[in-house]
Image (cartoon, rainbow, N blue to C red):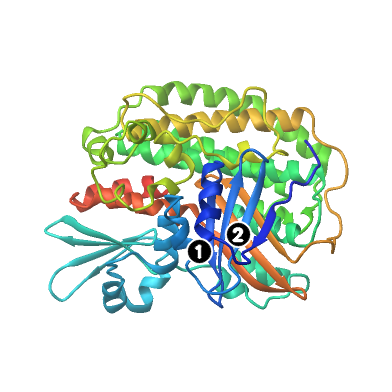
Amino acid sequence: MAEGVFRGVWVTEAGGEREARLRFLAERGLRLLMADVDAAGREALHFFDPREGKTLHLLSPEGGGLVEAASRFFPSATRWMELLYGPEGSRRDLLVERQGTRAEAKTHGGGGVERAANGEVLYSEGGLLLEVSGGRVLRVTECLRQAPCLSLRGVRVGKEAEKVRGSLGSDLPLLLSFLLALEDARGYAVPASARAVRAALLELLRMRSHCSWLSRAAELCGRFRLSRRLRRWGEGVAELEDSLSGGGGGTAALVPGGARHVERGPVAREIWNYMEVIAREWEELSRSLSAFSPPRWAEGRLAVLPREEGRRRGKELECRAARGEGWEAWVGPLARALGAARDARAEDQAFPRPPGWSPRAAAGRKGTLRRMVEVMAGEVADSLAILEALLREPPEGPREAPLGRRGSGRGFGRCEGPGGETCCHLALDRGRIEHAAFSLPVELNRSAAFCLEGAWLDEAEELLPLLLMV
């Protein structure tokens, strides 16, 4: 694995024509990764430049308007306008009135049902509120956005590392994106062996998460025996993850500047010995998954989601999830199932790619749920190949090193988690966190749930976790 560090370019607006600058970036083919706004109202845009293989960050020195201007050239900026400031005609007042502070607790939590005095049912799941009447979903509304940055501001990254870890919880991609941003801000190059451990942990998490999703999809299709087999296979992957991390889950193995020390020899042999077993079992499971036949009602409900090939043909978009809702910002397996081959691993020059690997993007006339199954199953096979490549030639050298102090105090980190690309923008001031913002796949992708308007509630309850990967 390459040990080089590919830092981004940071540009602060200093007069000039904003629209001309954004038009130039769009014509150059840059992809908008994330937008955020700090406590003073200063906005920032974060891009990936495929020509240079680096990120570019555009900062507004004061005031807003940058994200709104970007929406005229980058369609995905529309979605960020909604996340940062709320969509026009938002019904979040309904959310506040009827669910109060409880709704905020459900923004990133599990589902719940509330019944209003007039008999109307409010169902919350994955940061969404579903208004239900007569057993049908009348309207889908996004909940108030919660972000881990609120509890991180003012934290000293060195002395209060455990407070940071507690704020970010057990979300491995979230913590890793934060660490990458911190290492970028402090000007530190992570050792190659530590990058390999991090990559292996992410791939194990992807395998386990995708397997859980496929198990749920199998239940939806009435394939209960296959669902149980998939769950058992995922439990075996979880045991490998514990072996690599030394117990305590993947996040326990991550530290600023590298990864915690784990005995290389025994762990590598244990994983290598078990790799053949789980690879052989996955081949059998893949054959069963290839015969998947999702229910017609499910495919019919998801058929309105826009596909990349339809967009290229100028096809009219048929639902609120596609029209003007920033669907171009969707990430992860959902986006790839709809034909967009976007994957942060393909844009990371230090990522250990097996020969011939490339992001999977579904195509053809198959239904959306069927395409999602194919993408998920294929990515599990890809993760197995990536792990095999890491174990066959593991990089040598230290796993940790002290943080450097050569950085500018501002950094950006990104990684491809199971649900999609997770990003972090971090600004430090004398060792304390001045600003931290995150891009979460579940937030970007949840506007796809607008396609459930008009569905029966029991159908929505089945499809919503599959759309959001929660």
Observer-nearest of 219 and 165: 165
Type of amino acid at the residue the image marks with label 2: Leu
Determine the secondary structure under disc 2: strand
Name the side, left or right, on which 158 lies relative to 39: right
Q: Which residue is mark 2?
A: 58
Task: Find residue 88 and report its horizontal and vertical position in percent.
Answer: 31, 66
Q: Quadrant of residue 122?
A: bottom left
Residue ranking furthest to the front: 16
Q: How many marks?
A: 2
Q: CA distance from mark 1 to mark 2?
A: 9 Å
Q: Residue at x 65, y 54 (%)?
A: 413
Picture disc at residue 66: 1
Q: Quadrant of residue 134?
A: bottom left
Q: Residue at x 49, y 39 (%)?
A: 210
Q: Residue at x 60, y 66 (%)?
A: 15
Q: Residue at x 81, y 41 (%)?
A: 3
Of the image marks 1 and 2, the number of the one nearer the N terminus: 2
Task: Find residue 412 and report its horizontal and vertical position in percent.
Answer: 66, 57
Type of amino acid at the residue the image marks with label 1: Leu
Picture disc at residue 15: none
Q: Is 2 above or below relative to 415?
A: above
**For the N terminus, which image quadrant?**
top right
Task: Find residue 113 and report its horizontal and vertical position in percent.
Answer: 27, 65
- Can residue 374 be seen in the rendering of this structure? yes
Determine the secondary structure under disc 1: helix
Q: Quadrant of residue 100?
A: bottom left
- Circle 1/circle 2 CB separation < 8 Å: yes
Task: Find residue 196 and report its horizontal and vertical position in percent.
Answer: 74, 41
Q: Is 314 above or below relative to 161?
A: above
Observer-nearest of 240 and 428: 428
